[in-house]
Image: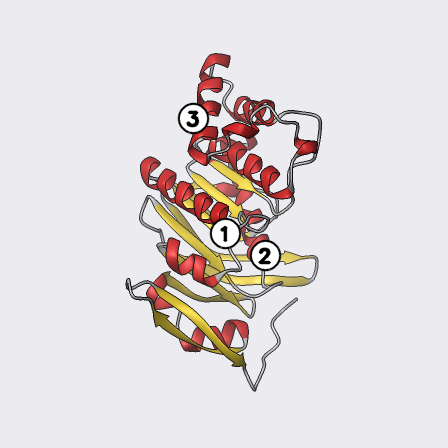
Amino acid sequence: MTELVIKNLSISYGSKNILSDINIPAFAPGSMVGVLGPNGVGKSSFLRALAGLNKYHGSATLNGLELGTMAHQDRARQVGYLPQTLPQGTSLVAYEAVISACRAVRPDLSHPQAQKLAETTFNELGITKLAFQPLHQMSGGQRQMVGLAQVIVRAPAIMLLDEPTSALDLRWQLQVLDVVRRIARQQQGLALMALHDINLALRHCDYVVLFGNGRVLACDDVSRVMTVDHLKTAYQVDGRIEQCSQGTPFVIVDRLSPTPHHHRE
């Protein structure tokens, strides 16, 4: 069972405050959480802080242990982070890259065990055909899938995924979100995923954390967070929340808000 609790968290760069007073109660284990908000609001900074790449003030505990004071190896084992930047296009083949990522945080595994985990991960993501292809011969979307495999193969308690579908076409976007959600549920872990596509989040996520104006505007079940008022406050648009014939909510944007409120850059 995985429990992440965030209290009074703030993130700054020098004298510039990015996020303040972030309080997020524990999500149900096995959940996928959409991290939403406009460009520049701090979504990436928030994920990087949890991954140990940005300093923060306040408290972020994983199963009662403060993330900021965990040893690097322990945090790397428990927290898997996928940045927006794609894996470098090196001559390394995908299989080697994923095996290396696994062994880096799981020295307890034998090489055959790591190989088995890598093979399972490639199968789950549907990218077995890429296994022995050099990264420099891959498209951006293919390298993004390999980067995701490097996170999944470690079986972390928390997956922090920053725009994991940005370089993918529609089919692969759905594939990624379905796989991540299934793995989170199977392992009773958590997946926090920064997304720009609100409708993807509404379809796939259990919860949404909506950032705006340097703070959390709302954090709850997706149906409670995505409201007309929150759309206007966060994105400065006038829109509607409709339902498809199968009952899934989706956002329709009608126009830019006539009274725009500039968010933090």
Q: Which residue, given by chain and number where applicable, does mark 1 sit on?
A: 170
Sequence-first disc among 1 and 3: 3
Asked if marks 1 and 2 touch (Cβ < 8 Å), the reply is: no
Q: Residue at coordinates 32% horizontally, 62% vertically from top-left?
A: 248
Sequence-first disc among 1 and 2: 2
Measured in 3D between alpha carbons, the distance from the residue under mark 2 to the one under mark 3, in whole angstroms, is 37 Å
Q: Residue furthest left?
A: 246
Q: Residue 29 at what x, y percent from top left?
A: 32, 44
Q: Quadrant of residue 24?
A: bottom left
Q: Residue at coordinates 69% horizontally, 36% vertically from top-left?
A: 88
Q: Residue furthest bottom?
A: 258
Q: Specify whether 199 is left or right of 40.
A: left
Q: Is residue 59 visible?
A: no
Q: Residue 52 at what x, y percent from top left?
A: 57, 42
Mark in front: 2 vs 3: 3
Q: Which numbered circle lies on residue 120?
A: 3
Of 31 and 137, the residue lying toward us: 137
Sequence-first disc among 2 and 3: 2
Q: Which residue, given by chain and number where applicable, does mark 2 sit on?
A: 11
Asked if marks 2 and 3 touch (Cβ < 8 Å), the reply is: no
Name the amino acid type tagged 2: Ile
Name the amino acid type tagged 3: Thr
Q: Residue at coordinates 70% horizontally, 32% vertically from top-left?
A: 136
